[in-house]
Each structure stands twice: as structure tokens, then as C-alpha cells.
Amino acid sequence: MKIFADSGCDLPKEFYTENNVELLTLRVDLNNQVYNDILDIDPKVVYDAMREGVVPKTSQVSPELFLNKFEALAKNNEEGIYIALSSNLSGTYSTAMMIASQVRENYPNFKLKIIDTKCVSFGLGILVQEAVQLREQGLSCDETAQKITHMAEHMIHLFTVENLSYLAAGGRLSKSSAFIGGLLSIKPILHVEDGKLIPLEKIRGRKKAINRIIDLMSERGGDFSNKKVGISHGDDLEFAKEVQNLIEEKLHPKSFEITTVGSSIGAHAGPGTIAIFFTDKDY
């Protein structure tokens, strides 16, 4: 079984090669130059440009890339699963569906499951990691897709950004939701609901925002003793580690993993973003 993942899952470059996962790159347009996320551009470059006022743009995985990868799968008569970025944040899922149906015209036995996870960043990454584990356990494509879909429905994303105007500029958040962005040291707390970014609360100061996020984690996650917590940061590893310590003190999760918010997601969220991912208490 081949596993496909787009770069919206914020897993590091080496993950793909080490775990035999096919990378589908989103694209980042910075200063009128288009780069393939992960392969051609480092997130730090994007964040530094944003700090200087550059507004990067992103575009979805190219139809050609989908066609090449999907046709290769069909020709080899292999099964595949593509764990896709939320369809409410990117057109990537619908392009994949369109290309898959084209491939099916020539290869009627084409076996590919495409999952609209409604997840983003490392919330999506955790699903991809889980799929690798399930494949190692010998689960079929159908069983894996079922389990990943179930896990996706229970994935919680909680995050705070340094500046809401980045999300508004990229069209990922309505302008009216971004109105608080200009207020002094107000830190918004957002979450993902049905694959969309939704502001939850606004808190004054970054530390207070994180403490509030930890309260929300406790409410939504319940017992963390058997849970992994993912933390993604927009070029601020120091703060991500502080956040890890705060969560550790209060919730004692089984494990943590820290990743950088990659270029294609970071281009919208901006530097200083801190995002936290875990499965809910009903999972």
C-alpha cells in the first residue's frame, strides 16, 4: 500500500524517505518566484520575508504532479491512500479527486482512497504517521482508510498566531474575524471546525493565551496519559519548548512531538504561530 501526503501536514523532509511516503508538494510564491514546499524552500526563509512585510502566496499541489503519481500507482497495479489537507482550506483535495477520476477512465481497476481529513498542519501529520504504523501492522487499504477517517474526526487543533492579518491576507480567515488583529498584544485562540479556521477567544498576552489553550486541552482531551501531543511553531522553537513544559506540568501526556509549521501553512499563519494537536476525549 502506497501512502500519499501533501506538504500541508508539516512533517519534516526526511520523514517521507524514511517511511516510504509519497510527498505531494504544495507551492509557495515568494517575491514572484515559485518554490515546491519542502523540496525547494526552507520555512525560515518564508518567515524572515514575512517579518519584513512580504506577503507570500501559496498554490495547491499541481494537477501534473497528481497525474504522474496516480498513473504510476495505477500502472503498477498498487493500492494507495492519500491523506489530504482540509478541503475547506485548499483546493488540493478536489483536484486530487478530479485527477483520480481521470486516471480511472484509463485504468478501471485504479485503487486509491482519498481522505478529506478536515485537518491541517501537524494535525494532518499525526494522521500520516498513524497510517505508516497501520501499514506496518499489515492492515489493508480499506481498514487503514477507515481508521484514519475515524481519527481525523477526533483530531483537535488549538492555536494562537502572533498576527491575524496574515490569515486574513491569505483568505484563510474572514476579514471581520481578523478585526482584533490590530489591538495591542491581543492573542487570538483559534481552532479548526469542519476543516475551517474559527476564532474561539481573544486573550491579552501570549503566556495567558497558552494557559487558556491548556485549559481547553484539558476540557477537550480528558485524560492525556495515553495521548501524544503535537506542537508546531512558526520559527520559535524556544517558545514551543516552553509550551511543552507547561503542558507537561498540567496534563502529563504520554509523549510530545515538536515540528516547524512548514512554508505552505506558515505563509498564512505567520511567524510566532504556536499550534497544538491531540485527539479528543471520545477517541
Image (cartoon, rainbow, N blue to C red):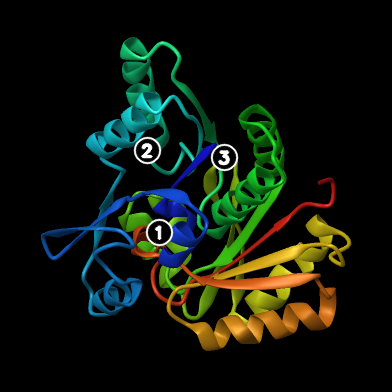
The residue labelled by disc 1 is 265
Q: Where is residue 130 in the image (x, y as percent from the top left)?
A: 65, 51
Q: How crowded is mark 3: few (under 14 residues within 10 Å), some or many (20 or more)?
A: many
Earlier residue among tags 3 and 1: 3
Given the image, on which type of amino acid does mark 3 rest? Thr
Label 2, label 3: how many angstroms apart (C-alpha)? 12 Å
Rendering quarter of residue 232: bottom right
Residue at the image position 47 percent from the left and 82 percent from the top: 236
- Residue 211: image quadrant is bottom right
Residue 237 coordinates in the image, percent (x, y): 51, 83
Q: Which residue is drawn at the image coordinates 33% and 32% (left, top)?
A: 72
Residue 125, image x, y percentages: 55, 55
93 lies left or right of 160 = left
Residue 84 visible in this rendered orientation of the protein: no
| Residue depicted at x 72% and y 85% | 245
Mark 2 vs mark 1, CA separation in Å:
13 Å
Count of numbered labels shown in the rendering: 3
Circle 1 SS class: helix
Residue type, label 1: Ile
Residue 73 drawn above or below residue 120? above
**Horizontal side, residue 125 vs residue 162: left or right:** right
Which residue lies at the image location 84% right of the left edge and 65% below the top edge?
Answer: 224
Q: Can residue 192 be seen in this view?
A: yes
Q: Where is residue 41 in the image (x, y as percent from the top left)?
A: 26, 67
Q: Does the CB distance between marks 3 and 1 fall below 8 Å?
A: no
Q: Nearer the viewer, residue 278 or 11?
A: 11
Q: Where does label 2 land, which residue?
A: 92
Query: Outermost residue, left direction?
Result: 32
